[in-house]
Image: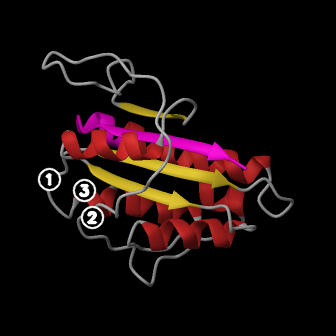
């Protein structure tokens, strides 16, 4: 069963241009990560280049700074106000600057994160943060897992192209 069937949605095309960085986000800092070879703190020293994982001890502003240091795209979606799958997808689409005709289904999300972003030109890498994904009856565990599977598939896609694609998420 594909993502569209699992979500009860059809597929939809999505055109994407180069994804831009978002404005600075302020959060508290935490203990210092390991140093890199230049004596600079490296958040990703122990984080594989293509992974989807809980945000855990990382702070959003530190992830954003690391993305900037690596000259990678930083994509951030704060989903605390979303309740349904459609609202979560709409929040992500807006935050990531997807086109207005984005299909608001899991297959369209996959397309925007992979093929059509790849067609926009050479990509250096991505650091993605999905903060406060809802835990509601209309966005249940199955919907959350399907969403994260889309991002895992995108991480695999970019791994084949040797482009880092790190996703960090948290739940409400």
- The location of residue 151, given as percent across then percent down, is 49, 47
Residue occupying image coordinates x 68% and y 44%:
145
Judge depth for marks 3 and 2 and give the one in front: 2
Asked whether residue 11 is in view, the answer is yes
Identity of the residue drawn at 52% across and 76% down? 103
Q: CA distance from mark 1 to mark 3?
A: 7 Å
Dot 1 falls on a residue whose secondary structure is loop
Q: Is residue 161 magenta?
A: yes
Q: Nearer the viewer, residue 36 or 13?
A: 36
- Highlighted magenta segment, given as a residue range: 157-172
Q: Position of residue 51 (x, y in %)?
A: 44, 32
Q: Looking at the image, which residue sits at the far bottom? A: 100
Q: Position of residue 87 (x, y in %)?
A: 66, 72
Tell me whether the residue at label 3 lies in contact with that at label 2, contact meaning CB atoms closer than 8 angstroms: no
Residue at 32%, 20% (x, y): give it. 45
Tell me if mark 2 has few (under 14), some (14-19) or many (20+) residues whose alpha carbon lies within 10 angstroms of its own. Answer: few
The residue tagged 1 is: 122
* Neighbours of disc 3 within 10 Å: few (<14), some (14-19), many (20+): some
Q: Is residue 50 left or right of residue 78?
A: left
Question: Which mark is drawn over residue 14?
Answer: none
Residue 24, picture quadrant: bottom left
N-term mark: 1 or 2 = 2
Residue 20 circle label: 2
Q: Which residue is mark 3?
A: 118
Is residue 12 toward the left or the right of residue 65 in the image?
A: right
Q: Nearer the viewer, mark 1 or mark 2?
A: 2
Q: Secondary structure at mark 2?
A: loop
Whether residue 9 appears in this view of the structure is no
């Amino acid at each position: 069963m594909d993502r569209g069937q699992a979500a009860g949605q059809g597929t939809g095309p999505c055109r994407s241009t180069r994804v831009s960085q978002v404005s600075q986000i302020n959060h508290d800092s935490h203990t210092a990560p390991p140093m890199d070879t230049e004596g600079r703190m490296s958040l990703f020293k122990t984080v594989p280049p293509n992974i989807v994982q809980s945000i855990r001890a990382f702070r959003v502003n530190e992830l954003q700074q690391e993305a900037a240091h690596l000259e990678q795209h930083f994509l951030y979606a704060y989903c605390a106000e979303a309740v349904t799958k459609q609202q979560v997808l709409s929040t992500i689409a807006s935050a990531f600057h997807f086109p207005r005709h984005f299909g608001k289904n899991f297959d369209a999300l996959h397309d925007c994160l992979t093929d059509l972003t790849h067609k926009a030109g050479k990509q250096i890498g991505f650091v993605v943060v999905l903060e406060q994904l809802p835990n509601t009856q209309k966005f249940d565990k199955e919907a959350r897992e399907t969403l994260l599977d889309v991002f895992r598939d995108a991480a695999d896609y970019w791994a084949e192209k040797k482009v880092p694609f790190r996703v960090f998420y948290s739940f409400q």
